[in-house]
Image (tube, coloured by chain):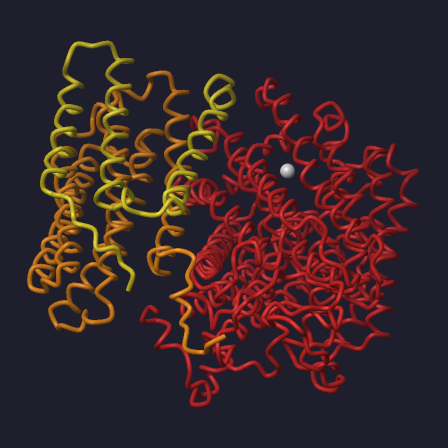
Amino acid sequence: MSGATTVSEYQATHTVPGRMGIWWFLASEIMVFGGFLAIYILYRMASGGAWAEMANHVSAPIGTFNTIILLTSSLTMVKAFEAIDNEKRKQATNFLLITVILGLAFLGVKAFEYSSEIALGFTPLSGTFWAFYYALTGLHGLHIVAGVIFNASLLVMAMKGTLWPNTQHRVEYAGLYWHFVDIVWIFLFPLLYLSY
Amino acid sequence: MTEQKNAENGHSEELSFWRKYVFSTDHKVVGKQYLFIALFMAILGGVMAYYMRWQLAWPETAVPGAGWIPEPTAFGGIIPPEFYNALTTMHGTIMVFFVGMPFLLGAFGNFLLPLMIGAKDMAFPRLNMMSVWTLFLASLVMIASFFVEGGAASAGWTGYAPLSADPIHTGVTWGLNLWILGLALEFTSFLMGGINFLTTTITMRAPGMTMYRLPLMVWMQITAAVIFMLSVGPLIAGAILLLLDRTVGTGFFIPELGGDPLLWQHLFWFFGHPEVYVVLLPGFGAIMEILPVFSRKPIFAYKTIIWSTIIAGALSFLVWAHHMFVSGMDPRLAMPFSITTILISVPFAVVIFAFMATLWGGSIRFTTPMLFALGTVMTFIVGGATGIFNGSAPVDIFIHDTHFVVAHFHFTLFPDVFLGGFAALYFWFPKMFGRMMNETLGKIHFWVTTIAFNAVFIPMFVLGLGGSMRRVYNPLQYDFLKPMQGINEFITYAAIVLLLGQFIFMFNFFWSMFKGKKAERNPWNATTLEWSVSYPIPHDNFATIPTVYHGPYEYSLPGNKSDWQPQHEENEPVSG
Amino acid sequence: MTDTKHAHPNYIVIWAWLVFLLAISVVAVYLPFSQWITVTFIFVVAAVKAVIVAMYFMHLKFEESLVRYIAIIPVLLFIIMTLSLIPDTVYNR
Ligand SMILES: [Cu+2]
């Protein structure tokens, strides 16, 4: 019964609380987006092809471009984590910067897409497909906004140098969230842009 | 450890009043804050029940004590149908989400979990503080919804579409939007809480505290947290779409616009059924702590109880359509969902039998917590058994949406939330407030509550079998219900006794908090870790993290000096 | 802390795979297969991409089994929920 033993030495798992917490959070997020996707898929199947006409008006090239942006931002995010792991601070800062810029670029493209669709008269009230389109991409967009804000705050800390030595593992947690949002998009893209 | 821990621990003496009692990150203070929110909201829900009961017994007469409600809502104490609908809706919402969950998960989960596993605090103390203040905000939003134009939500606590999807059906505009917002905040609060419960239990257990040495209360809390996290997501998705229907004008749940109102019911009950276990399991967890202490016996079949509840939790995701047998859903779904529903009673029967086997041959002490614990088990059996009626499609078609169902779910939730919650409160009060609650008053409280509760809800089964529909505003409008009006009046008298009985508790609670007998460190001679620290418990709980040598229920071991063996003592226990 | 000092995989190669999979799923839309085959193909590819991101970018491959369960169980629940709602929502309108 030595008082010097720390809890961590006796932890049943090697997973640190932060990472475990993020994974539980992601589990609940999977169910939120899973619910959304389930509703969308069921309605789409029930519509019996009536949505194909509506779905024809979204721009697959722009969607593809945005998908590449998001995939690349995931790459830079994980590279930032790798750099943190290898104690390369300058590199980590640069990769975080690129991630934030790519996140903003995604939002910019999305805003352009929204405005051109609204200019053509496709609003959330133009039928169930469009209602879903705006609801799903809107919720995903809000997640991107949250991720960009979080990544940007880490970037500021990294540039000031206050990220080290205590908080650098937050880059890993932010990354887990960012990749999750990427995965959501991986499914949203074919659901909304490709299957007409 | 992580950086949060270092920042939050220690230096509790230097904190200002606000950081210590209001915006505290101490899990014990957070737990008490949950407790007070729950008790306050329970008063609100109780008053609503009283208004409804009066209306049902003596329809459209002035309710004594409702005269203060201003004009468009009520008329000189007379409750109009619109307000009655709001009362049924908000009574259900408040009692399930703002009393049941904060009382059992919020208050006792937060207060006990780190103490029971031997941790200095939750894994994320600031997140914990945020969770209670999010719940506070959610409560304010819910209360505010009574005061907006059009009144509070009145589409039932289940918020069925299209009734809820378009304001033209109920005339409620902002009230229902705030209802959705309040629920969303409440869900957020308990998702934060759940992340904390799970992460703390997985990563911060004391040395020697293996998963199979955890007190069952902890097991029940984390099982409930998992069930909640996995079930609430689709409903959040549905709620966002419902809000868009109401505010933007989309038609996700409005049939004329191509929506499917039935899907809302599916989403609601995909969450709704697991949700009752979220409320149920922590209450059972409290019972599982109390029964061995006052039987001086180890709990019967510890691992079987754990795995039974996990199986029940998993099955709870596969039973939801038993709420929808008469909704017009595909009738082919009725059979599989009847079968899973009847299956799910098996693990719960196992748990109940484990309770009884724990009592068997024990030297039982009828203290107040024990009385409440036994009362919980007794009344819950009635609720569980009547659930089998509701769950079988052929019977349900007859009794669906009658007062039989109302009586059934009150027989499951009331014993669990209130009898189980009171048991827990009487049991852990010494640890929370350093004093004992009065035993005599406690026993009077128990007998009044239990007898009055049964007097309210046993006749309600009869009412329901007689065809009385739930949510009916004025039963006298129907000739076939008139002969049963005497039952309605009897129920209302009993309900008034039940509510008045709670004043005994309130007096006991506040009086004991300041004037009660000072409690010893371990007044019930219990074994789990929370009894190893004395009141007032410092911010970081344990001066040194204890090492755990035993399971949680080592009572009456042969050859031991005393009849209990604390988890943190190696051998040769000291008495006292 | 006990952060596993696993050697990081070559993320750029993984990214290239992801972009390649994206490309073939976009191209598949324009190929003259029946709609049923195309849709199945697109979603199988999407699932593969998601697994790659989870396994390598989110380093699920190197996590302990508990974390994998936390990730997989909600996905299974989502699938069960969707499938069991099909008879009601799709065929019973
Ligand atoms: Cu149910």
Q: In which quarter of the image is residue A96?
A: bottom left
Q: Nearer the viewer, residue C19 or B461?
A: C19
- Residue at the (37%, 16%) spot, across then down: A48
Q: Is residue A104 left or right of residue B188?
A: left
Q: In which quarter of the image is residue B449?
A: bottom right
Q: Is residue C78 left or right of residue A68?
A: right
> Is residue B151 something one can see in this rendering?
no
Location of residue B473 in the rendering, given as x and y in whole percent from the top left corner: 75, 44
Q: Which chain is red?
A: B
Q: In this view, does B252 lie above or below B154?
A: above
- Residue at the (45%, 85%) spot, across then down: B12
Q: Nearer the viewer, residue A7 or B230?
A: A7
Location of residue A175 in the rendering, given as x and y in whole percent from the top left corner: 23, 52
Q: In this view, does A16 lie to the left or right of B293?
A: left
Q: In which quarter of the image is the C terminus of chain A?
A: top left
Location of residue A16 in the rendering, given as x and y in whole percent from the top left corner: 34, 60
Count the labels in the image.
0
Location of residue B396 in the rendering, given as x and y in whole percent from the top left corner: 73, 28
Q: In which of the image's four quarters is ligand 1 placed?
A: top right
Q: Which residue lies furthest to the bottom in this view?
A: B14
Q: In which quarter of the image is residue C43?
A: top left
- Residue at the (77%, 66%) spot, across then down: B369
Q: Nearer the viewer, residue B315 or B526?
A: B526
> Is residue B4 something one can see in this rendering?
yes
Q: The yellow chain is which one?
A: C
Q: Is residue B85 above or below residue B261?
A: below
Q: Which chain is orange?
A: A
